[in-house]
Amino acid sequence: DAGVIQSPRHEVTEMGQEVTLRCKPISGHDYLFWYRQTMMRGLELLIYFNNNVPIDDSGMPEDRFSAKMPNASFSTLKIQPSEPRDSAVYFCASKGPGLAGGRYNEQFFGPGTRLTVL
Amino acid sequence: GENVEQHPSTLSVQEGDSAVIKCTYSDSASNYFPWYKQELGKRPQLIIDIRSNVGEKKDQRIAVTLNKTAKHFSLHITETQPEDSAVYFCAASKRDDKIIFGKGTRLHILP
């Protein structure tokens, strides 16, 4: 398996523009997580899905952020409109059900999307 | 909800010495404690984990300890090497629930 795939790897945009980040989880994984990482705030969980259903979106900073998971192999995180303070690395991670491969609860992270909002 | 505190935020040790990173958690129902390592510009990757029915676990030069009563857990790295330089995150979770991460410890291995 190729692991968790994210696109784009880098995104530079101007304030006010819409940004869409994409994620393909590992095949067979039923949990998907979106994180934001900054120097100041560390690794923050934004939202997570189980079987394509959003379970906890309490980490989504405000209404400008939205996430969808239309099927088991694809998720998007959208920021509209974007602001400079949204600049960060956004990670997607996925996890399989229960005890799989001996590593209970292990989350596998994607390579991240580095977002810069000017 | 769960809250994970991690310290120190930065740690410098001489190559060959040991490094210890400590974490506390707040939710007594948490039963899974992973540690992730993140090298510069890379993604976090799991290096070791421990479940609440175990007090200690070792994997070569790294070990984790868990004190459920005190809600403390620690990462120990012995005989540190340059490739151990990275940011280390502790985390806590309940089964089939989200993982809550600490703020991270930047470990520098000095030559």
Image (spheres, coloured by chain):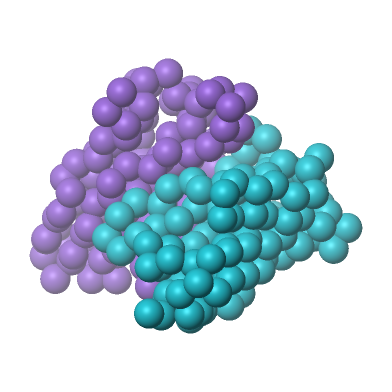
Chain colours: A purple, B cyan
Mark count: 0
Q: Residue at x 38, y 68 (%)?
A: B82
In the rendered image, which quarter contains the N terminus of chain B?
A: bottom right
Q: Residue B10 in the image: x percent, y percent?
A: 49, 79
Please give left or right for residue A34 compared with residue B70 in the image.
left
Q: Is residue B91 left or right of residue A86?
A: right
Asked whether A72 or B56 is in front, the reply is: B56
- Please provide percent x and percent y for residue B16: 50, 72
Q: Residue furthest right?
A: B69
Q: Is residue A67 above or below residue A91?
A: above
Residue name at image x 41 percent, y 80 percent: B110
Q: Residue at x 61, y 74 (%)?
A: B7
Q: What percent of the width, then of the height, locates residue B24?
A: 71, 65
Residue B100 is at least partly visible in this image: no
Of B45 and A116, nearer the camera is B45
Q: Which quarter of the figure has residue B22?
A: bottom right
Is residue A69 in sight in this rendering?
yes
Question: Quadrant location of the C terminus of chain B?
Answer: bottom left
Q: Measuring 31% from the left and 23% from the top, which residue is drawn there?
A: A1
**Location of residue A5 by image quarter:** top left
**Residue A58 percent coordinates (x, y):** 53, 51
